[in-house]
Image (cartoon, helix red, strand yellow):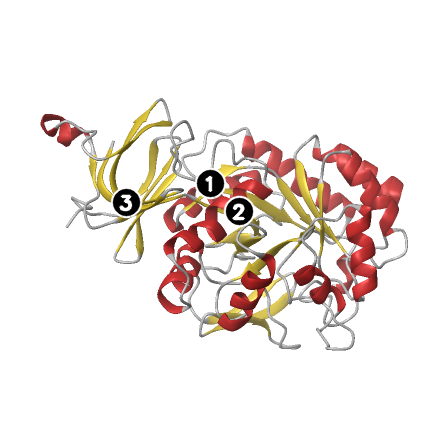
Amino acid sequence: MISGGKVVAPLGVMEADILIEEGKIKGLGKGLIDSHELDKYIEAAGCLVVPGFIDLHTHGLRGFSALTGDSQAIARMAEHFSAVGVTAFYPTVAGESLEQIVQNFQAVKEAKGKEIKGARILGIHAEGPYLNPTSPARGANPESWLRKPGREEVRDLIQAAEGNLSLMTLAPELPGAQGVIEELLAAGVTVAVGHSDATYEEAIRAFDWGVTHAIHTFNGMRRFHHREPGVVGAVLTDRRAWAEVIADGVHLHPATVRLTWLCKGPDRLGVVTDSTEMAGSPPGVYTFAGREVVIEEEKAYLRQEGTLAGSVSTFGQMFNNLVDKWGFSLEEAVALCSTNPAQEAKVFDRQGSIEIGKDADLVILKRQKVALTMVGGEVVFRRDETTLGE
């Protein structure tokens, strides 16, 4: 179905055809497509073909948010994500009250039940409400949205999610966090450390309790110090922690991304956008969680505090940063943007790499831009071009 592209596959980068049947990859190699049938296939000569990007931490984009309790907004997020190469994602929710969080859970559930021509909704990432209110741990979260960990309360949240809660972020140093972690793990939910002022010892203790994920490493965390490495030091040096990085060039210096890659190894690190509904918006002043946010030079920050307020970059831009600006190979960039997130989301048996038998969730890049996105063998986004190939 896709002919002649440069394919980034587990065995390396190769010129290959990709045969697709019933939404699955059925063949990968040269000369698989008969010349007399080429009019039935996508010609991708001169283009790069990669597995679809998987975003485990995103609040929204292009005016649509996962924080409004609106299932249609989340469905529109899924549609728009396909235009930037994302084929699967976790809507990341928060809220000023437990009732609002539950409404957001229900909205994700309803969106998952819709027929959507776009990215797959894999599950819910709840960022909070058990986050540390101190600075810089709080980040852009309003202090009024944060709560003390409660074991019975989190049981109610788990029940309200109806099996859709995949990831929850909390600050493990807060009193009562261990009980919350135990409840989440018993329900099969991955637990992440984030927006945390934990010391190194407190973070290691959290890993002992079963925390295995770290959201937007370095951001919203106690600052690293050579005599008190804090939660950052624990994340970088403990293999139990799978780490996120925001690769927009704003949240982290490129050398910091490289350092994190060197510390975590090729399989324990993934890129996320942490995008908000302001992603894709022009420079200006916007409102987020009742506060003014300024967008300028690809950066969004709270006007009053100056704190970064999520990312306004897309996954396609971050992939290009890795490959074209920061010296990562194509194989490394695919690992960070597709393979490792698929493994962390426990969907690698069917997504995250271009292999026979896996879902045909694919992205074609032409001149560093997303030209076509396919989910389950169906083209869900295509730029207005008569041909992809040169």
Residue at 86%, 58% in the rendered image: 174
Crowd band around label 3 with a 10 angstrom C-alpha radius: few (<14), some (14–19), many (20+)? some
Is residue 198 visible from the viewing direction of this image? no
For the residue pair 141 and 246, the one nearer the viewer reads as 246
Picture coordinates of residue 9 (x, y %)? 37, 42
Q: Quick check: marks 2 and 1 in contact, CB under 8 Å?
A: yes
Task: Report the residue marked by disc 1.
Answer: 352
In x, y percent, where is residue 65? 55, 50
Cα distance, mark 2 to mark 3? 21 Å
Residue 40 sits in which quadrant?
top left
Residue 356 at x, y percent in the picture: 38, 29
Residue 340 numbered mark, or none: 2
The amino acid type of the residue labelled 1 equals Gly
Residue at position x 52%, y 53% in the image: 266
Q: Quadrant of residue 323?
A: bottom left
Q: Secondary structure at mark 1?
A: loop
Please name the amino acid that badge 3 sits on. Met
